[in-house]
């Protein structure tokens, strides 16, 4: 029999609807070549997310136990008489009558003759979208089931997982999870914030919301991992949290497996490649993908990192990169919220009577292994059912929550303002979960928990700047303290050997200035943080004296010596940067 060409395929598709068969048909050995076997239910034309046809067909069939599965077949391979994929399909469907070259050709011809409507395949759980005739349809895939976000897609969408990693079935219902785990969120704001961050991970792409990474910082045995496992139990069985002892590529591959759901990393300070770690934080914060090229110079784009990252570490990010040459830009502070744990009970604020923090932590870990899963199932179903209502109300709700969070703080920094917006997304996720009756807390407790972590964040920034801004100020302070002998008096300019000096000093007491030579400042400070950002943070904190143009200040040099009263520009930093104010000291 002659193998149909691609042109024949298009003609057949235009004239024939999808063909459905039931298992009550005669034996496959008596079916004509243009008909489908009983185990094959439909043959579809595959399309991409933009609705464009791909060079393949998708066969929907039943295996020997009557379970549905999908198989993608390349049209070019069928046209060229290569039937390896068809043979695998025949084996999976129990169609052993077709395991010969002749019968496989007949089966391939039958598929080509019966191409019907179109289908879009996805290969993992998470958010997805498909376009048809210019209209975009959104959906969320969970456990292989398609949950529409808004109008149901006009194109059939099916999930064919590309790995064997599957979520275990839920072990309990929502009420049981709340009885053993959720009830302890009341009175424990850090635990509550972690659960809200986990729930919000399903909303970011579905509602075009900014993404914020949660990082819990504290010494060992403070309950950081327990909090991660509580958030993990909302979706899956809690297990050992993977640490960052590995390469950046290995960590990225792990995060790529968690699309639009929470992902967890422990011991961030163990990362081998600090540059790669910082880049990963930006990729997650931006929901971005990494682009590379192959040996034949073709561009390859990895899946975007769209997880909701909840990390833990014994050091802040600034402390992690302090001993390296890694550049830490200000944008990291807009994408990362560090919650530093320092209380005697660690992450716990409210411990059941009769239990020590260690006993309470062990109890929660045991519960997270036993009760898990259905909270996330109910959350995704609720987002699907209520998508239109949430989408309409969310913009105004976000503004309202942002204003409420900032009402007690004087936040003017644009970076912190962006971080607060990400925190507001977590709060809105919590309020949506309350309306779906998924959490056993109230609205004010959610707001109070968010205010608490925001207050802790703002309080740590004693100069009213961002974490990176604080690091800039501290670095300049340390630079002056450790190298005071490298700053000569400005009156000695041109009279002394200038090799190895950092700059000059001018004035005395409170009016004293350290005048950095531009090249020195840009090498020692600008190379690590970016000169413009570092200067802006020093200027905002009141430590940098600058002219109206730029960040440098012009000074007249001594009349004696080689300069003869000429003018020269420096980065002028107040000596007060090295001392605490009276208010700070008390």
Image: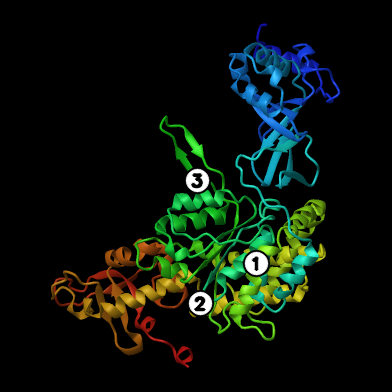
Observer-nearest of 423 and 552: 423
Q: Quadrant of residue 398?
A: bottom right
Element type at mark 2: loop
Query: Mark 1 and mark 3: span between their CA atoms?
Result: 31 Å
> Residue placed at 78% from the left, 38% from the top?
153
Instruction: Estimate the x, y position of residue 243 in percent, counting from the top left.
Output: 49, 61
Q: Which one is in front in this view, the residue at disc 3 or the one at disc 2? A: 3
Residue 343 bears which disc, if any? none
Observer-nearest of 98 and 181: 98
> Residue placed at 65% from the left, 28% from the top?
72
Element type at mark 1: helix
Q: Is 312 left, or right, of 111 in this rendering?
A: left
Q: First in sequence, mark 1 or 2: give its number.
A: 1
Instruction: Estimate the x, y position of residue 525 in percent, counting from the top left.
Output: 34, 67
Element type at mark 3: loop
Q: Which residue is mark 1?
A: 230
Q: Is 570 left, or right, of 7 in this rendering?
A: left
Residue 470 seen in the current view: yes
> Residue placed at 32% from the left, 64% from the top?
522
Q: Quadrant of residue 420?
A: bottom right
Query: Mark 3 and mark 2: span between their CA atoms?
Result: 33 Å
Q: Which residue is mark 2?
A: 461
The answer to whether the residues at label 1 and label 3 have Cβ atoms under 8 Å apart is no
Q: Measured along the vertical axis of the image, is residue 258 above or below residue 330? A: above
Q: Measured along the vertical axis of the image, is residue 36 above or below residue 49? A: above
The answer to whether the residues at label 1 and label 2 have Cβ atoms under 8 Å apart is no
Q: Quadrant of residue 554?
A: bottom left
Q: Which residue is mark 3?
A: 290
How is the model colour-coded?
A: rainbow
Observer-nearest of 431 and 270: 270
Q: First in sequence, mark 1 or 3: give its number.
A: 1
């Amino acid at each position: 029999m002659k193998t149909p060409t691609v042109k024949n395929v298009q003609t057949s598709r235009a004239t024939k609807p999808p063909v459905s068969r039931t298992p009550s048909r005669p034996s496959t050995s008596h079916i004509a070549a243009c008909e489908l076997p009983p185990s094959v239910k439909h043959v579809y034309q595959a399309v991409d997310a933009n609705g464009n046809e791909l060079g393949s067909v998708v066969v929907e069939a039943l295996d020997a136990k009557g379970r549905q599965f999908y198989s993608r077949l390349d049209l070019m391979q069928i046209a060229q008489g290569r039937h390896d994929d068809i043979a695998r399909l025949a084996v999976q469907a129990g169609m052993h009558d077709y395991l010969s070259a002749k019968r496989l050709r007949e089966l391939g011809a039958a598929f080509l003759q019966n191409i019907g409507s179109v289908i879009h395949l996805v290969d993992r759980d998470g958010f997805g979208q498909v376009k048809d005739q210019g209209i975009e349809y959104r959906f969320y895939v969970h456990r292989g089931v398609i949950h529409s976000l808004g109008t149901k897609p006009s194109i059939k969408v099916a999930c064919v997982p590309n790995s064997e990693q599957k979520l275990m079935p839920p072990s309990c219902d929502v009420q049981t999870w709340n009885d053993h785990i959720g009830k302890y969120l009341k009175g424990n704001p850090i635990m509550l914030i972690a659960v809200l961050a986990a729930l919000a991970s399903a909303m970011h792409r579905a509602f075009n919301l900014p993404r914020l990474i949660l990082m819990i910082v504290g010494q060992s045995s403070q309950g950081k991992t327990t909090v991660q496992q509580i958030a993990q139990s909302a979706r899956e069985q809690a297990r050992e949290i993977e640490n960052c002892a590995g390469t950046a590529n290995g960590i990225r591959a792990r995060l790529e497996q968690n699309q639009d759901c929470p992902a967890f990393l422990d011991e961030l300070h163990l990362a081998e490649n600090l540059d790669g770690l910082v880049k990963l934080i930006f990729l997650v914060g931006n929901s971005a993908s990494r682009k590379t090229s192959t040996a034949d110079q073709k561009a390859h784009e990895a899946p975007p990192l769209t997880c909701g990252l909840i990390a833990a570490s014994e050091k802040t990010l600034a402390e992690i990169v302090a001993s390296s040459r890694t550049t830490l830009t200000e944008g990291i502070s807009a994408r990362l919220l560090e919650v530093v744990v320092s209380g005697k009970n660690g992450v716990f604020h409210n411990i059941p009577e009769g239990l020590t923090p260690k006993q309470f932590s062990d109890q929660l870990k045991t519960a997270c292994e036993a009760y898990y899963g259905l909270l996330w199932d109910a959350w995704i179903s609720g987002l699907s059912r209520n998508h239109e209502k949430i989408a309409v109300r969310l913009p105004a709700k976000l503004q309202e929550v942002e204003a409420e969070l900032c009402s007690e703080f004087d936040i003017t920094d644009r970076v912190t303002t962006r971080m607060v917006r990400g925190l507001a997304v977590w709060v809105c996720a919590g309020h949506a979960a309350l309306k779906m009756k998924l959490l056993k807390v109230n609205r004010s407790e959610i707001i109070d928990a968010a205010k608490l972590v925001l207050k802790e964040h703002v309080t740590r920034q004693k100069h009213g700047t961002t974490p990176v801004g604080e690091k800039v100020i501290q670095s300049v302070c340390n630079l002056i303290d450790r190298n005071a002998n490298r700053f000569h008096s400005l009156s000695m300019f041109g009279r002394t050997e200038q090799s190895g000096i950092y700059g000059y000093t001018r004035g005395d007491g409170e009016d004293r200035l350290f005048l950095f030579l531009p090249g020195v400042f840009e090498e020692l400070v600008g190379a690590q943080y970016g000169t413009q950002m570092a200067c802006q943070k020093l200027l905002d904190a009141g430590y940098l004296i600058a002219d109206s143009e730029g960040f440098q200040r012009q000074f007249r040099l001594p009349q004696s010596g080689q300069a003869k009263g000429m003018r020269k520009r420096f980065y002028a930093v107040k000596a007060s940067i090295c001392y605490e104010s009276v208010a700070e000291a008390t």
